[in-house]
Image (tube, coloured by chain):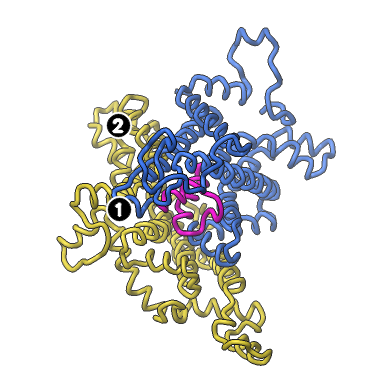
Chain colours: A blue, B yellow
């Protein structure tokens, strides 16, 4: 945090590999993260899922998720690795295709709400106790007061079945936590010498906010982004069950929702496959996110 | 006297928030909500008929007038009649809310109590294998979707073992209550436990590392006594805050899934049906009331801080 203009540490010269303790936030974080086996495992699993999603994106696999390829409730076989569902659709293909849906929802919601939260949080913090801060705080308090699932339902009612209602509602609710954290950090940072110096040499306010303050909250944005990603994937399942989620395509949430009737008939394959795919990705992301938090939070003592 | 003026100031301070949440639910669900004009008209209506129905529904009046009317509905708890059943919304609410409270109370209490106990144990043995086991379990619990837990528990206890009912709510005495409430309670405890344990452990670890705890240990106090008197009691403020704040969330979000899945006639089932059928009078009542309830809890918490912790300033911003 000594040099405000630089987000990431510069590439280290070879001599640094003799490694006297690294001192920058990111250098220390990297060292700590590398030692965290659970976090590394989590990151590796997330990477595998991401490749799976990229493959679906390019049409390499998971292309036949909607056709009825077999009879209903076929067991696992060479043709259908994990059997078929009520409609005779291939469960494995559907689960793989859903990986793409999950990453789309997670990434869109995480990126947008982190951007929004970072931007508004920085403004709110920089102009703290002025009117713009009061308005933003009021907005955050208001949005935080409406229970999430009801808010999504309300947005869905207002947008009359628009497929983006879910994304919009998620972004509108998830940015507030990020904004509050960034606001606190910016309030802390703006009294430090480097900001005073920036004022002294006559930099404009927006330049100070975007060039000097916001980059220094990047560790918060990164951690919050991973937390929002997980929340979005988990929320999608519930929303799809409520009929407010994914409108076209297939997702783990839709698979679980359609499997609820199959389970009562003693057919568990669809349910188990969709839940397992989702559980493994969410669990891996949670481990990764925890590792990131441990590495980046200066208050958390290294274990 | 000082306290009374503090309470009044806090209540006044809550007004912008209440206006905010009601404004958002009004804009989303009434102003941009479903247009009922053509449901009330015969086929091939004339311009004059359309205008007459719109006037009857109040669609032609200005924004602020309609918002004021919504506020009046909120204040008098009179939301009109359900679109799908024609029953008065306020009587639906008073019939279903007690069911939801009876359904969710045991899971809510157990989930928090167990979370605190596990958090205490993990905090006491922090860094050791007991801690790692509990926190590992918490991450696993956090990674499983609520819906998955409900479906799995229902299949396990209702279909495979056949111990408890799969659907319904036929409660007239204590044994029948226990019969219907057990599986939903297990599910909600399971889901809440991961998040609760993690939060409580973090709060308790902070307290356990303080000097006064070390002093108590040095004086030879028993672990149970230290944990209860020195650690738990001092961490009460964040713990109570979290528990209070989770109430609106639990009542609505928790009951939404459990009740619609188990077919229990509580407020969550009513809300679920209203979402799927677009029943706007019920939705606007539920959304508006929960949001206002949340703001009230916010204010009550602030006041409780003052009562519990004398260090909280009465004049400055207490948060």
Q: Which of marks 2 and 1 is in front?
A: 1
Who is closer to the viewer here, B16 or B135? B135
**Residue B197 locus on image (x, y percent):** 36, 40
Looking at the image, is A257 positioned above or below residue B195? below
Judge left or right: residue B64 versus residue B293: right
Residue B30 visible in the displayed image: yes
Secondary structure beneath label 2:
helix
The residue lying at 68 percent from left, 46 percent from top is: A119
The residue lying at 57 percent from left, 37 percent from top is: A53
Q: In which quarter of the image is the N terminus of chain B?
A: bottom left
The residue range painted magenta reads A230-258
Mark 2 → mark 1, Cα distance in angstroms: 55 Å
Question: In the image, which disc is placed on residue B216?
Answer: 2
The residue lying at 50 percent from left, 67 percent from top is: B11
Residue B85 falls within the magenta-colored stretch: no
**Residue B99 locus on image (x, y percent):** 30, 67
Q: Are marks 2 and 1 on the same chain?
A: no
Check the residue under mark 2 and report the chain it is in: B
Looking at the image, is A204 positioned above or below residue B57? above
Q: Mark 1 points at which residue?
A: A264
Judge left or right: residue B129 versus residue B9: left
Q: Are marks 2 and 1 in contact (CB under 8 Å)?
A: no
**Residue A92 locus on image (x, y percent):** 45, 39
Q: Main secondary structure of the magenta part?
A: helix
């Amino acid at each position: 945090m000594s040099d405000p203009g630089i987000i990431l540490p510069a590439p280290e010269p070879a001599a640094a590999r003799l490694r006297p303790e690294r001192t920058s936030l990111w250098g220390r974080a990297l060292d700590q993260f590398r030692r965290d086996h659970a976090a590394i495992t989590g990151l590796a699993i997330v990477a595998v899922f991401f490749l799976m999603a990229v493959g679906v994106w390019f049409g390499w696999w998971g292309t036949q998720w909607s056709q009825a390829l077999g009879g209903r409730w076929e067991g696992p076989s060479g043709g259908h690795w994990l059997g078929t569902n009520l409609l005779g659709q291939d469960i494995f293909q559907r689960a793989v295709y859903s990986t793409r849906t999950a990453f789309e929802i997670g990434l869109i919601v995480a990126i947008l709400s982190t951007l929004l939260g970072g931007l508004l949080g920085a403004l709110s913090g920089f102009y703290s106790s002025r009117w713009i801060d009061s308005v933003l705080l009021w907005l955050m308090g208001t949005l935080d007061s409406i229970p999430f699932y009801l808010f999504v339902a309300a947005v869905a009612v207002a947008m009359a079945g628009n497929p983006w209602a879910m994304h919009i509602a998620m972004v509108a609710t998830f940015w507030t936590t990020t904004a509050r954290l960034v606001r606190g950090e910016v309030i802390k940072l703006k009294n430090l010498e480097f900001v005073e110096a920036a004022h002294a040499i006559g930099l404009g306010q927006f330049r100070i906010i975007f060039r000097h303050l916001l980059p220094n909250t990047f560790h918060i944005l990164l951690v919050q982004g991973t937390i929002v990603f997980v929340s979005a994937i988990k929320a999608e399942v519930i929303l799809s069950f409520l009929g407010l989620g994914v409108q076209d395509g297939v997702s783990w949430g839709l698979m679980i929702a359609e499997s609820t009737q199959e389970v009562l008939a003693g057919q568990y394959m669809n349910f188990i496959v969709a839940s397992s795919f989702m559980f493994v990705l969410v669990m891996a992301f949670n481990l990764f996110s925890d590792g990131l938090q441990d590495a980046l939070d200066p208050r958390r003592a290294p274990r | 006297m000082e306290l009374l003026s503090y309470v009044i100031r806090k209540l006044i301070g809550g007004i912008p928030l209440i206006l905010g949440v009601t404004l958002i639910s009004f804009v989303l669900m009434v102003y941009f909500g479903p247009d009922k004009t053509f449901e009330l008209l015969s086929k091939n209506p004339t311009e004059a008929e359309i205008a007459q129905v719109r006037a009857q529904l109040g669609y032609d009046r200005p924004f602020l007038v309609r918002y004021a009317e919504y506020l009046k509905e909120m204040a008098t708890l009179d939301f009109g009649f359900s679109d799908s059943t024609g029953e008065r919304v306020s009587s639906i609410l008073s019939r279903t809310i007690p069911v939801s409270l009876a359904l969710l109370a045991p899971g809510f209490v157990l989930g928090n109590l167990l979370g605190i106990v596990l958090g205490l144990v993990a905090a006491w043995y922090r860094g050791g294998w007991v801690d790692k086991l509990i926190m590992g379990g918490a991450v696993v619990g956090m990674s499983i979707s609520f819906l998955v837990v409900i479906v799995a528990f229902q299949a396990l206890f209702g279909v495979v073992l056949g111990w408890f009912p799969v659907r319904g709510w036929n409660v007239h005495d204590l044994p029948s209550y226990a019969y219907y409430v057990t599986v939903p309670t297990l599910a909600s405890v399971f889901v809440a436990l991961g998040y609760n344990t993690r939060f409580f452990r973090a709060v308790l670890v902070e307290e356990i590392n303080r000097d006064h705890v070390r002093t108590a240990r040095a004086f030879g106090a028993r672990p149970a006594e230290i944990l209860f008197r020195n650690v738990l009691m001092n961490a009460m403020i964040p713990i109570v805050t979290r528990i209070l704040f989770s109430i609106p969330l639990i009542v609505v979000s928790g009951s939404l899934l459990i009740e619609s899945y188990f077919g229990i006639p509580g407020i969550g089932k009513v809300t679920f049906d209203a979402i799927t059928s677009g029943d706007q009078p019920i939705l606007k009542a539920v959304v508006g009331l929960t949001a206002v309830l949340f703001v009230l809890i916010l204010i009550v918490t602030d006041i409780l801080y003052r009562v519990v912790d004398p260090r909280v300033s009465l004049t400055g911003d207490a948060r």
